[in-house]
Amino acid sequence: MLIRCFRLKRIYCKVLLLLTVLATVCLLLYLRSKLPNSPVPSRLVSKENYPFEQKLLAWESKIIKGLGDEGEPAFLDGEDAIEGEKALKKYALNTVLSDRMPLDRKLRDPRNRKCKDLKYSPTIKASVIVIFYNELMSVILRTVWSVILQTPSHLLQEIILVDDCSTDENLKGLLDHYIATRLQNYNINVIRLKHRLGLIRARLQGAREATGDVLIFLDAHCEATKDWIEPLLSRIEEDHTAVLVPIIDVIEANNMGYSTNGDSSFQVGGFSWSGHFTWIDIQDENDKNKVTPIKSPTMAGGLFAINRNFFWDIGSYDEQMDGWGGENLEMSFRIWQCGGRLETVPCSRVGHIFRDFHPYSFPDDKDTHGINTARLAHVWMDDYKRLFFMHQPALENNPIVGDLTHRKQLRQKLRCQTFKWYLDNVYPEKFVPDENVSAYGQARTEFDMCLDDLQLPDDKVGPLGLYQCHQFLAVSQYFSLSRRGELRKENFCAEVFNKRDVQLTECHGHKREQYWILYKNGTVYNPATRKCLSSDGVEMGKGVKVERCRGGVFQRWVFTHVNATALPG
Ligand code: UDP
Ligand code: MN
């Protein structure tokens, strides 16, 4: 064109060129004006990703500066507040609020004051792996930003995001565009799974791609806090078999407030015989205020750090576990039984949004938690699996549980300890309902009525009930009389209230109201009130009580199994 131009009259030619240049400049200026205050270098915005850029800018323009700073609970007004409430019901999370809150909000330092005096200088690097399925983009990105902002760059090898085949369109092009334009200076690798694999296999995919010395897994709705990574890496550098969990603080799903219990004690992981993870209070007074790593019998599963080679050596995950759940107890038992250690690191704290329900469903609506737990019970719990299968009898000999050959071989190869060893050495305070007890099973009256927990939820206090005895030994009617004199059901103990009512409540160890004596004649006596457990006048489905001891059929309880030599006459 230029050559031809020179052949034309020169003045026209110059005007034509000038006009072309002017038009191009105008077009560029127009495009720039559509991207007000764009933090993005214009070279990163092309015709293809222009719609994404517009969408991000529109979103970013609505972010409210300072909202949720220091981890303060935040509230919106008007229509946003109403929409937020609706979102909470639908997604178990106030998505409206999260979208308005800065992605790089600053949290206050939640650690125990004593942590600030400790100095760590790890020399190894972490790969942080975040898996997600249809999580809210702003929540994922806040997780990523918190890792970037709270981790010295020399300790961070990479961040790996594993998309477990989300169906939410925003999590594809828009997320990629965000990373390419706002996080382009950081090493972030997004893996897209072609099929939904469930969280266990999604984490495995992430681990396969990782190159850091240590793998740190985080759920996609977390926020790391000051100096979170240093104590984790230091401890693993010191002992490569230590698998570590930070203190997991609560980020409230409704207002995004970051809550801690200050400098007071924290909890470690336990489990219930129904195969669920539980939080347990630290028993030893000296350990309650500790700032160095402390033994934890199990872990919650979503957030932990492990040496990468050790992760593979010790059997990574059970790849045949589907969906969600069970993998955390499997890994916890395996780590302890096969030569590792599981510890909570009090000076590393990460917030996690605890949702009231899972905002996603699983293909085929399978009870993956139950099936996965049945797998781990068969492989790791030896005879103690009886206590799990009592809760899930339908899974005991069920082919749905799948083939276990490889996991059993792994246990042999690693020459792992027995589950009894684990209970004795790692979790001696765990109550075993049919060991070292003077009686256990159903506690039955002569009228075929049994003590029953009346389906009391795990975190509630409720009456010790009476119900028609079931034909089989159902969990709700399984009680033990411990050697310490507790009339007990896992973590619940029967306690006398108001000298009359009997409630199932937390076991206190030595509380007199929780102390019972079972006599050979079937009387269950409470010395604190000098009264006896009675079913007299109690309707089915109501709570039993204590009354003046006078013998007779209403005060006689026959346990399925009794260690008669352990009972007083
Ligand atoms: N997740 C996944 N695939 C699934 C289900 C969950 O990748 O099929 C992710 C989810 O997005 C989250 C992590 O796995 O980042 C743990 O799930 P969730 O937070 O729902 O479990 P919880 O914290 O309630 O145990
Ligand atoms: Mn989670």
Image: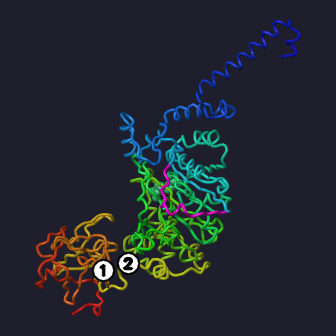
Residue 339's image quarter? bottom right
Callout 1 secondary element: strand
Q: Earlier in the sequence, mark 2 or mark 1?
A: 2
One can see residue 555 in this view: yes
Q: Does residue 398 appear to the left or right of 153 in the view shown? A: left
Q: Which quarter of the figure is the C terminus placed in? A: bottom left
Instruction: Please give the label number shown on residue 480.
Output: 1
Query: Mark 1 near ligand 1 (CB under 8 Å)?
Result: no
Within 10 Å of the Cα at label 2, are there few (<14), some (14-19), or many (20+) other Cα atoms? some
Residue type marked 1: Ser
Nearest the viewer among 522 and 295 is 295
Q: Nearer the viewer, residue 459 or 539?
A: 459
The image position of residue 333, as x and y in percent, is 51, 73
Q: Is residue 101 magenta?
A: no
Say left or right for 66 vs 30.
Answer: left
Residue 111 lies in magenta, yes or no?
yes
- The residue that appears at 48% across and 81% down in the rendered structure is 425
Which quadrant of the structure image shows residue 279? Answer: bottom left
Circle 2 is placed at which residue position?
431
Name which residue lies at 40% across and 71% down: 272
Magenta-drawn segment? 107-122
Indicate the quadrant where residue 438 lies. bottom left
Q: Position of residue 155 (x, y in %)?
A: 65, 57
- Local crowd at mark 1 within 10 Å, few (<14), some, or many (≥20)? many
Nearest the eye: 41 or 265: 265
Instruction: Please say if the residues under marks 2 and 1 sit with CB atoms less than 8 Å apart.
Output: yes
